[in-house]
Amino acid sequence: MRRYRYLAFILFVLMIAVPYITVFIFGGGRKTAPHTDDPVRNEIFDMEISLYRTKTKKVETMSCYDYICAVVAGEMQANYDEEALKAQTVAAFTYMVNKMNYVKQNPDSDIGHNGAYVCDDYTHCKAYLEKQDALKKWGDEWYEKYYPNIENAVKESLGKIITYDGSPINAVFHAVSNGKTCSAYEVWGTDVPYLQSVDCEADKTANDYESKVSFTHEQFSDILYEELGVVLPNDYKTWLGEIKTCDSGMVSEIVIADTAYAGTHIRKMFSLRSASFDMEVTETGVNFTVRGYGHGVGMSQYGANEMAKKGSTYEEILKHFYKDTKIEDYKI
């Protein structure tokens, strides 16, 4: 009888303990950020961040360290050079502070976060990949080999911020440029002094630098009709008109059947990897040849890694992509 009671007690303890053990090993919930010898940086590591989770539609709070680790894991390849990961850390932290300041200064504004500083939708804020999700996505070997690189990069550089004229910048970034980054004016129509076009020739060596997308005449026509209500003429030879490009090489305007469209609009409609593309209409269909990946503004992540591999520090990388900026210590 005593034996059964003992077994029952063990089972009871395991039922209570297992969830906590799982959280401890794989993450989840709020975790304790590592501490350094600098109390000011520790305060930044522990700073509470509110995150709107788009799937659950709930707001979660966590330490700044945990949030930035998850953003770097979601946004940059974990096997990139440590200086590139540090540059991504500082860019992500600066972007977060910029958003946080806006929410604090405009408490009644509705930016779709339900009151939180940031969200986990990469199309609206930044990608977010927690430890347990990274383990599932990458597998044991990749996770164990590379996730510590992210944690070390965040620990080494979190607390630095990119500023222009004394204020944190809107530190946007993208995966691969077409060999030149785009200015904010080219993509969004607003001139931002620190978001100017800069050379990034190394991006042309990326494995996924060029991509091709093809549509039949019918598919192309259907998309234009569904998106814009446009009916194309029967003669496909009359479809393609003049293509204008920006200084960066991005398509600023393209004429299709006598109507001009922004290159960014065409990119969105046809799910192209970037707005830097060539378009060709042939007897069999419409072909796009696309260069780069992303909106093209700010830091190129691939370019940052190539600079890091050649010996550039994260400060040098950031100052290359964000013109006339400073790297400073953040003060809460």
Image (cartoon, helix red, strand yellow):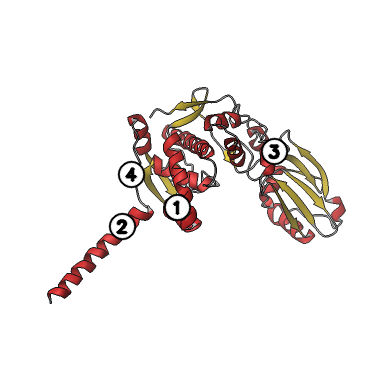
Query: Can you tell which quarter of the image residue 233 is in?
Result: bottom right
The residue to which callout 3 is attached is: 179
Give, as a three-letter code, the residue at label 3.
Answer: Gly
In three-dimensional space, the C-alpha distance between marks 1 and 3, rounded to whole angstroms, equals 33 Å
Q: Is residue 221 above or below residue 268?
A: below
Which label number is shown at residue 144?
Answer: 1
| Mark 1 or mark 3: whose residue is earlier in sequence | 1
Q: Is residue 65 left or right of residue 82?
A: left
| Mark closer to the chain start, 4 or 3 | 4
Res 32 label: 4
For residue 107, say whether it is visible. Answer: no
Q: CA distance from mark 2 to mark 1?
A: 18 Å
The crowding category of the residue bearing disc 2, from other C-alpha atoms within 10 Å (few below 14, some 14 to 19, many at least 20), is: few
First in sequence: mark 4 or mark 1? 4
Judged from the image, the secondary structure of the residue bearing numbered disc 4 is loop
- Camera-side residue of 171 and 66: 66
Instruction: Measure how far apart labels 4 and 3 are at the Cα level.
Output: 41 Å
Q: Position of residue 199 (x, y in %)?
A: 68, 32
Does the residue at mark 1 contact the one at mark 3 (Cβ under 8 Å)?
no
Extreme residue in the left direction? 2
User: What x and y, as percent, mark residue 267?
Assistant: 68, 47
Which tag is nearer the camera, tag 1 or tag 3? Answer: 1
Q: Crowdedness of circle 3 by 10 Å Cα count: few (<14), some, many (20+)?
A: many
Q: Amino acid at mark 2?
A: Ile
Residue at left 31%, top 57%? 21
| x then y, percent, for residue 296 | 64, 39
N-terminal-most mark, 2 or 1 = 2
SS at circle 2:
helix
The residue tagged 2 is 21
Q: How many marks?
A: 4
